[in-house]
Image (tube, rainbow, N blue to C red):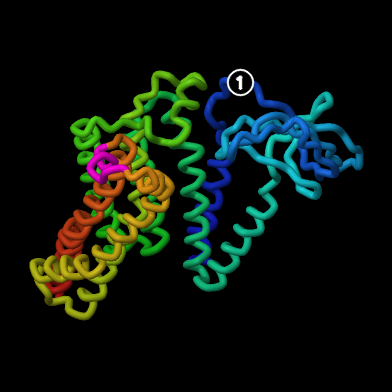
Amino acid sequence: MKKALPIAVLALVCVVLACLPGSRRLAAPAGETARATVVETDDSGVQLHGLIEFGTQRLKVRLPDGSVKRAHNELRAQLELDKKFAVGDTALVVLGDEPLVARDHWRLGWGALLFGGFAALLCAFGGWTGAKALFSFVFSCLAVWKLLVPLCLAGWNAAAMSFAIVALLTAVIMYLVAGWTRTGLAALLGALLGVGASLLLASLVTALMHVNGATLPFVQTLLYSGYADLDLADVFVGAVILASSGAVMDLAMDIAAGLAELARHRPDLPGGELFRSGVRIGRSVVGTMTTTLLLAYSGGYLTLLMVFAAQGTDPLDFLNSTLVSAELVKTLVGSFGLVLVAPFTALVGAFVFSRHASRHDSRN
């Protein structure tokens, strides 16, 4: 029962977050949607120019009630947004007068199956710890979608709000992993110090390098959707903080757990020795963690690097470009915070565990 209580509380919090109203809508919903099976396609209205298709794909779809209706799918010559249907596909259509609008492929069924498999594997492997990790995963998604995104759209400082949400998520995750213990406290404070240092550095470097959030995906769409007053530089800094926070939490917990185990076996160790041990633990982990962060970011702009390579762009030119400079800021600022979290956590952990050892010795 005691193990299930944190999970029950977090599940209740997730339900409350899910029920919160989202961001204000600037346009009315497109209408009621339904799944439909594509039974016939007509590509005569689609034109091919090189690799790009545009025009109207005409469809016949079978709705859940068995009726067959006409629908159309507009191709706008945008590879990242366009979709094309084949007979047998399941489409998400907007109901109304014919022809219906085929909005996109129906993917939520496979997505739900994938998430269900992930949840089952996590709980089977991790037991209660896996269940807590699962609910922290859901809580993180809801906190970003129901708290961070609406607050940023409402005009709140995106960088400050990202730091606040990361602090909340870090506190919840550290509690679920370590409970109300000195290990959890050391990891929490170390992680927050590392994220805070990243926030300050990101704010400074984006100004010095003239990097703004215009390089983020769909920024122009967002601005023309009624949010032209957004501070894109703040949004960019917030994105940097949010993206690197997971690795920072991971490293902080590694060091705090190592110091806790060391203090348990050697309660007589002074704070200075604990600090040096924490730094040595951090050195062993931070090398692989910074590389992990680099590879995670690189995956997001792999095609950009391929474009520069295919065009034979000089390395100095593409490293100085706005797009690559923005990604460098993300990678290096995140790595900077990751490196700093090691001594921060070692310092906090040395203070916390040595103070506990001193009180224990005085009682004896």
* Residue positioned 50% across, 66% down in the render: 130
Q: Position of residue 59 (x, y in %)?
A: 81, 36
Instruction: Check if residue 355 falls in the magenta segment.
Output: no
Q: Looking at the rendering, which quadrant does residue 77 occupy? A: top right
Dot 1 crowding, Cα within 10 Å, few <14, some 14–19, many 20+: few
Instruction: Tell whether 355 sits left or right of 160.
Output: left
User: 308 and 304: which one is in front?
Assistant: 308
Give the residue number, with chain letter if any, for mark 1.
27
* Residue positioned 84% across, 32% down in the render: 70
In this rendering, does residue 282 appear at all?
Answer: yes
Q: Looking at the rendering, which quadrant does residue 216 occupy? A: top left
Q: Position of residue 33 (x, y in %)?
A: 74, 34
User: 287 and 47: which one is in front?
Assistant: 47
- Main SS of the magenta segment? helix
Instruction: Tell whether 194 sits left or right of 71.
Output: left
Q: Position of residue 294 (x, y in %)?
A: 32, 55
Instruction: Check if residue 315 falls in the magenta segment.
Output: yes
Stretch of the chain drawn in magenta: 313-320
Residue 10 sits above or below residue 44 on the image: below
Q: Position of residue 170 (x, y in %)?
A: 36, 52
Report the number of numbered marks.
Answer: 1
User: 215 and 202: which one is in front?
Assistant: 215
Q: Amino acid at mark 1?
A: Ala
In which quadrant of the rendered image does the C terminus lie?
bottom left
Instruction: Tell whether 196 sits left or right of 65.
Output: left
Residue 116 sits above or below residue 48 on the image: below
User: 52 and 58: which one is in front?
Assistant: 52
* Residue positioned 89% across, 41% down in the render: 65
Instruction: Tell whether 153 sits left or right of 298.
Output: right
Residue 290 sits above or below residue 320 on the image: below
* Residue positioned 83% across, 39% down in the render: 61
Q: Secondary structure at mark 1?
A: loop
